[in-house]
Amino acid sequence: MTADLSARRGFARYTWLVLAYTVAVVLWGAVVRATGSGAGCGSHWPACNGQVVLRAPSLETLIEFTHRATSGILGPMVIAMVWMAWRRFPKGHPARAGAVASLILTLTEGAVGAALVKLELVAHNASVWRAAAMAVHLTNTFLLLGALALTGWWASGRPAVRLRGQGAAGALMISAVVLTILVGAMGAVTALGDTLFPKTSMGFELSAVHFLERLRVVHPIAAIGTGIFVALSGRMVRRLRPGRETERLSTALVALFGLQVMAGTVNVVLLVPVWMQLVHLLLADALWITLVLTAASVLAAEPRAEAAPLPEPASPRPAAV
């Protein structure tokens, strides 16, 4: 029994490590986009410019190749995670489901990345198709990070999520998750516009010709509105489902929202430098992971049962004569 518990704790630690590594890969992917290095390996995939071993590569090629190499390492890491989950947890355990979902999303993440290269939706491509692909890429990335976080959460002994019968708390958490994914997708498109059409002033180009420039005004408004909703939802679920873990996570959620708003403001003021884009994305990933775990904590809790009616007072017995 002690050995099984130790093995499960080791698996949980490994899963959190995989999650941290994935966040690092995501951030380096942002470097690829922000530096315009997506075409550093040409339209070849998985080889780089038709080569397996690079010879006198350019800086763009090195940046893109590094991203491909680190992304390629992620696959075996997740496969090992699935194998470990099958060895350490019984049939029907949520950690197994989380590990399988992580593997599927890792494969789709690679497929989307390969499609971007093969369809040449990289470098200076400013088409609607590339914008749509960036939104899909971000959505898949968020889902992958969420699946990894849930796998580690469940492997640490937390109960599975239940969606039915969760009432107002469930509605708030599901809405917050969906809205955050949508805002994240908008952010990916906005970041693309900032890369292809660098800002020269703090103003929004409402009269700009290209749609990527005009969309810049949408993301900040949507992000602030969604952030306020997420923060208020976090405060409300603390009252609806009181508990130490839910309180701790929802408090972190509100704090991260405040940091994200400040980072977004600084990003705009500094005209979106690459390093600030990475800080902004890192906070977005942290906010998303915290939201997923908050939702898992809330939706795993039993809905409050209605108070049982008080028993009617007994009729007074007549005094004995």
Image (cartoon, rainbow, N blue to C red):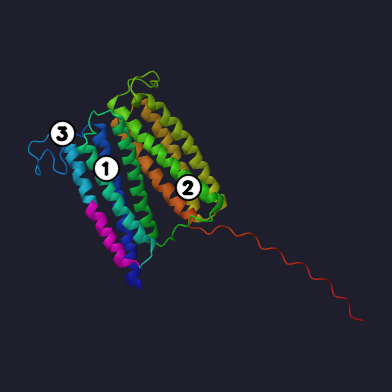
Which residue lies at the image location 34% right of the left edge and 63% below the top edge? 9
Judged by depth in the image, the label closer to the viewer, 1 or 2, is 1
Residue 28 image position (x, y, % from top left): 25, 40
What residue does disc 2 label? 174
Q: Quadrant of residue 270?
A: top left
Residue 27 image position (x, y, % from top left): 29, 40
**Magenta part, dominant SS:** helix
Asked whether residue 9 is drawn in magenta, I would say: no
C-alpha distance separating marks 2 and 3: 43 Å
Kindly state the secondary structure of the residue where label 2 is placed: helix
Tell me which amino acid carries mark 2: Ile
Q: In which quarter of the image is residue 212?
A: top left
> Magenta region: which residues?
75-89
Q: In which quarter of the image is the C terminus?
A: bottom right
Which residue lies at the image location 18% right of the left edge and 42% below the top edge? 66
| 2 or 3: tag closer to the N-terminus | 3
